[in-house]
Image: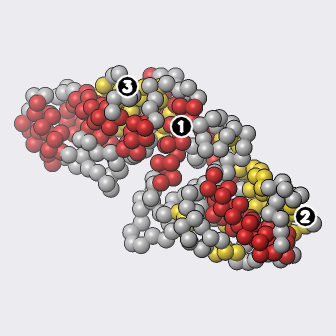
Amino acid sequence: MPKKPRGPLRRGWTTGACAAGATKAAYTALLTGSFPDPVEIVLPKGDRPSFALARKELAPGLATAGIIKDAGDDPDVTHGALILSTVRLLPAGRGIVFRAGDGVGVVTRPGLPIPPGEPAINPMPRQIMAAVIAEAAAAHGGTGDAEITISVPGGVELARKTWNPRLGIVGGISILGTTGVVHPYSCSAWIASIHRGIDVCRANGVVHAAACTGSTSEAAVQRLYDLPDIALIDMGDFAGGTLKYLRRHPIERLTIAGGFGKLCKLADGAMDLHSARSEIDRDRLAERLQRLGAASDVIAATRTANTAGEILALSQAQRLPLGEVLANDAKAEALAMLGGKTAVEVIIMDRNGAIVGRAGF
């Protein structure tokens, strides 16, 4: 994740909020002949964002409106994307029908909040869009029956930077958001993706999943196990978020794989492995090395080392199994968090992906 900027951070709006704003503008244009610009919507917690329209197209029975997503100061892959809503009037009694346009994915696997075959438009964005349709219908004499097609030009390329391919969402991005608001660096979207990944594993009968801190550890796991893509959980720094969810929604076996520095922290009980929120405990590492019989100069150097990599090199120079000790300690922390519902192994690797410690199942 990019480094968080200093100072107050500007919040933004989710793809779901933008889709709802565009939907309200398009449906209003169908009923009145003109687009509200800017268009204001009400979000679930009472926020009332106002969006300028980037596109307006009106034809008999059909209207399209577009809004450029502003994610504020959050490093969101969809920041700057054009979110389009094309609304078509339906006969009275048909209700609201959602369609996936260009760049919006379709769900193909069970385990997600939306069933297979449906557009990847999450439940809350659907509710917000239904609410703005009802609001505009009441204000301008409509029936509230409409087909809503959400499109995101370039969404296929954006989806490659998300979990969608692994989750079985094909053809583009998802339309997301539970509150409509993006809180910069809240990490809520990442943790939600971890939860959805676990849901998909369970729904598809996966009995062995791997939670990895990054691409290097993931590649190392794949050299050991031929796991399907859906079994690979991009845990990042969120060990706690992963393990807490697995405690409530267990999988039979879990491999935790990560770099030496991050799993040092897990071995000491840290559940957020980000460098800004937890640090390696040099004194505890020195104590472990002392128990392993390290020379006094190595123990002293460990207490003042600049990086975890430096400590690993010190232990390796004396052929001390520090990685094995840490893997076992990290496994114990994970098992305690999981409450005995999932078998665990921990694999620790260096920066080159070589395994330097392993506590098996």
Identify residue for label 3.
343
| Residue at 47 percent of width and 22 percent of height | 225
Going by the numbered disc 1, the residue's amino acid type is: Asp
Q: Position of residue 27 (x, y in %)?
A: 80, 67
Asked which secondary structure carries label 1, the reply is helix
Going by the numbered disc 2, the residue's amino acid type is: Gly
Identify residue for label 1.
199
- Any part of residue 350 in sight: no
CA separation in Å, label 3 and label 2: 57 Å
Disc with the residue nearer the chain's start (3 vs 2): 2
Position of 315 with respect to 3 (left or right) is: left
Asked which secondary structure carries label 3, the reply is strand
In this rendering, the answer to whether 106 lies above or below 35 is: above
Q: Position of residue 137 (x, y in %)?
A: 79, 69
Asked which secondary structure carries label 2, the reply is loop
Position of 168 with respect to 11 (left or right) is: right
Q: Residues within 10 Å of mark 1 (few under 14, many from 20)?
A: many
Q: Quadrant of the C terminus?
A: top left
| Residue at 39 percent of width and 41 percent of height | 244
- Any part of residue 204 in sight: yes
Identify residue for label 2.
61
